[in-house]
Image: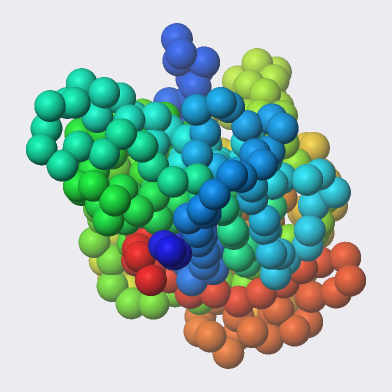
Amino acid sequence: MKFTARANGKVNLHLGVGEVRSDGYHDMATVFMAVDRPETVTLTTLEGDVDKHPDASPLSYVSEMRTTYHVQEPDEDLDNPKNLAWKAVDSITTGYMGILAQDEKRENFKPDLPMMRLEVDKTVPVAGGMAGGSSDAAAAVQAISALIAHHDRPMPEELFTNLVPGLGADVPFAEMGGIALGTGRGDALVPMMGRGTYWFAFLNPKVGLSTKAVFEKLDDLRFTYASMVPHMDTTTLSRALVSGDPQLVGAAMHNDLEAAALALRPSLQQLIHDAEDAGAIRAMVSGSGPTVAALCADEGTARAVVDKLGSASIEAFAAHGPVGGARLL
């Protein structure tokens, strides 16, 4: 039996990063837009005795994981229990089994779930600032929720609400899709109004850039340069999105993390310049990078930027938004 779900990558049109909170996270004011770079997750139930991954928890119902890459494959093997999609399945099944353990007298009680294999079809660059891992987790939540509903009963909404944010700050938006303002850690979401379709050329220079390192670099830069203050006001961007004018949206785009990403990978600055010289309205680092998101006036321009800048060292593709959130196929 198979359950397949899909979620999309994202671009941050605005990323304001505030001070470090007591929980170690930074306060955020970010505007997400989901773009049509899908991550597809399939759960397949298994029968009989199954050998589990040596690092899997004894409570895990996932025996193995396989990822098919349509982007550059990372050097590190990501098909293990540390993967966000695997963690999502473990988190949901553990919570569900806990509910069943408290409800043993319920009619039609089923004490267990089948073992399963997890397969991921990946089109979002790994560690590229486009929330590919979070999209995997969001799709995995949809797939395991469907399996649970088929096996026993729909998953309680409160379980879904309580567990999903714990998988990562970007996972709730990957579930929602569209356009949204994220505050707090970025996971307190409010849908935003927007008109029109926006085309981007995404340019991934295939160099690693740790999210943790980028945030730490931003903190260092702010300690040194008092003029580097958080940009938390999204009013101008909000108005631009309502207008449906890519020129206005491009003028309003901003990323507090860009300075830190450029300090760690100075070559990204040239890529930004090249994208704008090739016809993009505005190019900037996507999220914590290293992918550069270049907003263009239309599909033709986005594909022209991709054709001009794509190379053996730069993975380039065009994508548009906004698109929907995680869903079953």
Location of the N terminus by quadrant is: bottom left
* Residue closest to the eye, 268 or 188: 188
| Residue furthest out toward the right | 312
Question: Image point 39% across, 42% down: which residue?
Answer: 113
Answer with the quarter of the image where residue 142 lies. bottom left
Question: Image point 55% across, 43% down: which residue?
Answer: 62
Residue 250 location (% of width, % of height): 49, 64
Residue 167 location (% of width, % of height): 46, 34
* Residue closest to the eye, 289 or 167: 167
* Vertical relation: 254 (above or below) 329: above
Question: Image point 49% across, 22% down: which residue?
Answer: 25
Residue 51 location (% of width, % of height): 66, 41
Location of the C terminus by quadrant is: bottom left
| Residue furthest out toward the bottom | 300
One can see residue 60 in this view? yes
Answer with the quarter of the image where residue 219 lies. top right
| Residue furthest out toward the top | 22
* Residue closest to the eye, 67 or 136: 67
One can see residue 33 in this view? no
* Vertical relation: 68 (above or below) 101: below
Query: Does residue 120 appear left or right of residue 53 in this picture?
Result: left
Question: Image point 64% across, 50% down: which residue?
Answer: 65
Query: Does residue 137 appear left or right of residue 235 in this picture?
Result: right
